[in-house]
Amino acid sequence: MAVYKFKTPISEEDIRKLKVNDVLYITGTMVTARDQAHKRALDYFKQGKPLPINLEGLAVFHCGPVVSKEGEQWIAVAAGPTTSTRMDIFEDDFIKNFKVRVVIGKGGMGKKTTDAMAKYGAVYGAFTGGAAILAAKAIKNVKSAEWLDLGMPEALWVFEVEEFGPLAIAIDSHGNNIFMDIQKKAEENKQKIYQKLGLSP
Amino acid sequence: METTKIVENVAFNILKQASIYLPEDVKQALTQAYAEETSETGKTQLKAILDNIELAEKHQAPICQDTGTIIFYIKAGAKAKNLDKIEEALINATRKATKEIPLRPNSVNPFTQKNSGDNTGRYIPFLHWEIVSGDSLELTVMPKGGGSENVCVTGMLVPGEGINGLKKFVVDAVLKAGAKPCPPNILGIAMGGGTDIAIKLAKKVLLRPLHEPNENPEIAKLEKEILEAVNMTGIGPMGLGGKTTVLGVHVDYAFRHPASFPAAVAFNCWAARRASARINADGTVEYLTHKIKW
């Protein structure tokens, strides 16, 4: 378990150094995107329209934050991760088209995303679900708010972060996926659990 | 002060209490889980959770950015006055809480996908009414997170399998949910009635404190048995592995139709938020779950 501290934009070479169970802290630019923002970004790509920000080498954060406005400045009040599996239907194309290097969320992602991460060089960093204030403390500045018409949770928030983490590397760029391993082991434990409860398989 | 204004203030206060401060029983269970967790990664997750609880209290900010769908449970004394004004007062409190705490606007029109921006909308906040004797009004709020809501299940079991069918249904639901509902979770389990009744009871039983097992010793035994079983899955805190997958299990039931065995499992995330207060007829207020003064 090694600890890495990376600054954005992150290179493919650096990302490939990371292995599952390593810990990563990120300094630089992070962009939130949930279901609606993923969908719109991919639609824009298809139409050849540019995104409000170039995502190459950046971190995308599955997060719908609570933000408040003080004067003209947005403040991130609470900003923990949302469940990433919902973005599985978009993430492989998202990584391929926009070259994001780190995907941050909770709950893990599936095989399609794992394969894309191996192919194009990206990792999945798990941040503790619900630890919204811990996350907000690492957000030093809300640089911009894009696509606000999608509503506060679904908008694209551009954060400037300092040592955002700890991120547990749960999917690396070498095809390893901790969540899938744990899930497989849990399934293997099923018969043992049924037996303890006196159930037939 | 006018009754409706009191209701609005109290509803705002319990929303604030629930959003910022976890109930003591949940905090204790998480602290104990941290002490007992043997997986290194699992322990890191529980540490982050405990740190976050402290930070939320210190900065008076919501524990989680998903401040939930707002659900109120109301026990209305049959002789309480102005019951027709309560709904409006609760809607106003929700709007005020969204702006001032602040809460994340979590109310979206499913046809247009537009967010109302203030946590209100058709049937939202949702109000569960119960008429009781007396003249006081008891309000409980449960801000319910979406991650744990997404894995709640109802099912129609085979009556001939009895309780064994239920046990299997719960274990399968926990395995299927995996990391998604922000474990360690609290499970509300109910059977009987009908699908609507089972899930309603399952969610409501989540309001029961963790250290209060069912008063029926047979059901208390079932709760314990299920708790031990689901913690053998190894899913662990945040699904990153470990022995703390579930903090507590509560079971409730209604009688069932001879041909049907409805069952439901309601998941709550570790940020199991709830707060209650009683408003007496003379306008005095007792806060029942949180000892914070405002």
Image: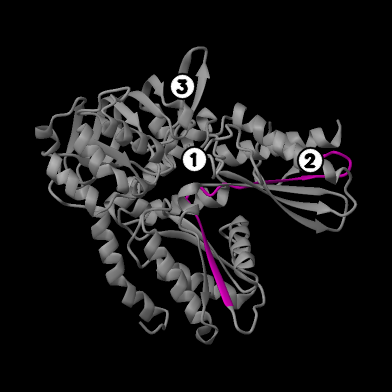
Q: Residue furthest top?
A: A71
Residue at the spot of label 1:
B66
Q: Position of residue B131 (x, y in %)?
A: 81, 57
Distance CA(mark 1)–CA(mark 2): 28 Å
- The residue indicated by pointer 3 is A75
- Residue A165 lies in what quarter of the image? top left
Tag 1 and tag 3 share a subunit: no
Residue B235 appearing in the image: yes
Left or right position of A19 against B24: left
Q: Is residue A140 above or below residue A84?
A: above
Which region is colored magenta? B261-285
Residue tagged 2: B285
Q: Quadrant of the N terminus of chain B?
A: top right
Residue pictured at 79% horizontal, 42% vertical: B86
Q: Amino acid at mark 2?
A: Val
User: Residue placed farthest to the front in the image?
Assistant: A47
Q: In this orientation, which residue lies closer to the viewer: B257 or B249?
A: B257
> Do tag 1 and tag 2 residues touch (Cβ < 8 Å)?
no
Q: CA distance from mark 1 to mark 3?
A: 16 Å
Q: Disc 3 vs disc 2: which is toward the camera?
A: 3
Residue at the spot x=25%, y=24% of the render? Answer: A54
